[in-house]
Image: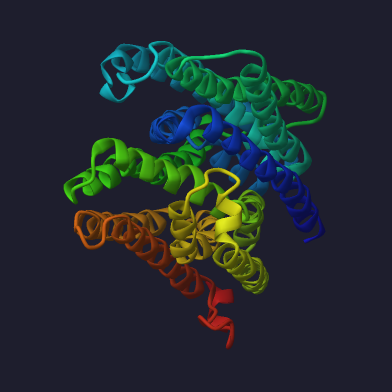
Amino acid sequence: MAIYYRGLFFLAASAFLGEGIEVLVNMILARELGSHGLGLYMSILPTIFLIVLLSSFELQVSISKFVAEREERFHRNILYHALTITIIFTSILFLVTAAILPFIPVFNTYHPYVRWLVMILIPVISFTSVARGYFMGKQQMGKIAVSNFLRKIIQLGGLFVLFRFFAFDPEAALLVAIGTLIGSEIIVFLYLIYLFIAQFQQLKRQPFSNLNRKVVRKNLMAVSIPTTGLRLFSAFTGAIQPFIIKAALVRSGMTDILATEQFGMLMGVAMSIGFFPAFIAHSLLIVLIPAVSKTHSQKDYPTLQKMLQQVMKLTLVYGVAAVTLFYFFAPELTSLFFKSATSAVFLQLLWPFFLFHFFIMPLQAFMIGLDMIKEAFIHIVWSTVISFALILWLGSSLDWRMDGVIIGMNTGSVLLALMHYLTICKKIGVSIFMKGLVQKAANR
């Protein structure tokens, strides 16, 4: 457990600094792009993240899980087959994306170069995922922590220098913002690949054993494919969410420009502030996947129960403190971005969304580590369908508008967290109140 806590500390510390930088990044974007430009930037991000997800093929999850479960003498062979899969998959995805990207309409309102900047991300993210997965599986979280911090600081430095010393028209400014984001990913790729090559050279000098090629690929695909499906669904719904929200607001009587500005304040201001404490949840997600996988492979259910108790208590403590702070100091916090009372109200109304989201991320790590990806996918589908239905229904109402949108978002977050939690409790044999441990779980 010592390595688990040490890894969490490194990740949480770097993520805290990274989230602070992210707030500065969004403040620069808000001031340089304006409310409409920020709305356009936030609208394209889910589509970019969708392409990033496809490029990663969730190899960081499958590799970390497989490496954590196997002895070190098998790691060289695992990485060899993982790299082979990555090369084949990346080549196919790059060619397919090059063929269809010019016809994706969402890019039509942006600078033509944005399409080709996104293309660069495909090989960058693919090979970075292999390195991340290996370091995660080896519990070398310091390297992951540094890479996460490096990405944020490069993005902040790039934005500061470019906007400080150069003047851009609105379209070019948006291109610079997106280009800086992608440039930071390239720097992280170079850093992690350098460390990965050095580590791989060490593995080549150590005794090793081979695993059957079909066994390795089957194990990697058994996690990568369903996890990619899960993430793909989430990314796809995230990509269409801006259009659903804006469509609902327009149907309620808002102009398209006002709807875009309101969405920009929701995602660029309220979400940026509300997700700040999520660095702890994200750190838990990264650490828990290999930790839960290894513990589950050993059938050590008492340890799994203890881990769940610790995660829930930690999340409750910082989550309640965070949303309380956001609620009572919303005007002061949102004024760092815009002098607008509207974004402060959004932040206050979204407290259930943020609080339960802090629980969702580590709970998803448990679901993956416990081989319950199918159940996690079903949970996400149900919560998203209900959330979007409420957004369209209430958001389109003249009486509700953005309040209705937020109700839909809150409902989806609460529902997803509860479904994950109840399923995990049943799997590892613990009551929902963390009492009365069920001994039969140890016999599974």
Residue 287: horizontal and vertical position, in percent?
A: 67, 51
Quarter holding the N terminus? bottom right
> 281 or 370, which is in the foreground?
281
Q: Which residue lies at the image location 64% right of the left edge and 55% below the top edge?
A: 284
Q: Which residue lies at the image location 64% right of the left edge and 69% below the top edge?
A: 321
On the question of residue 240 being in view, the answer is no
166 versus 414 height, above or below: above
200 versus 350 height, above or below: above
Residue 144: horizontal and vertical position, in percent?
A: 71, 38
* Residue that sits furthest to the front in the current view: 339
> 373 or 77, which is in the foreground?
373
On the question of residue 177 being in view, the answer is yes
Residue 2: horizontal and vertical position, in percent?
A: 82, 59
Left-right relation of 32 to 314: left
Number of on-image labels:
0
Residue 44: horizontal and vertical position, in percent?
A: 40, 30
Q: How is the image coloured?
A: rainbow
> 110 or 261, which is in the foreground?
261
Quadrant of residue 106 within the rendered picture: top left
Q: Which residue lies at the image location 55% right of the left edge and 51% below the top edge?
A: 334
> 184 or 141, which is in the foreground?
184
Left-right relation of 194 to 322: right
325 versus 247 height, above or below: below
236 versus 392 height, above or below: above
* Residue that sits furthest to the bottom in the current view: 436
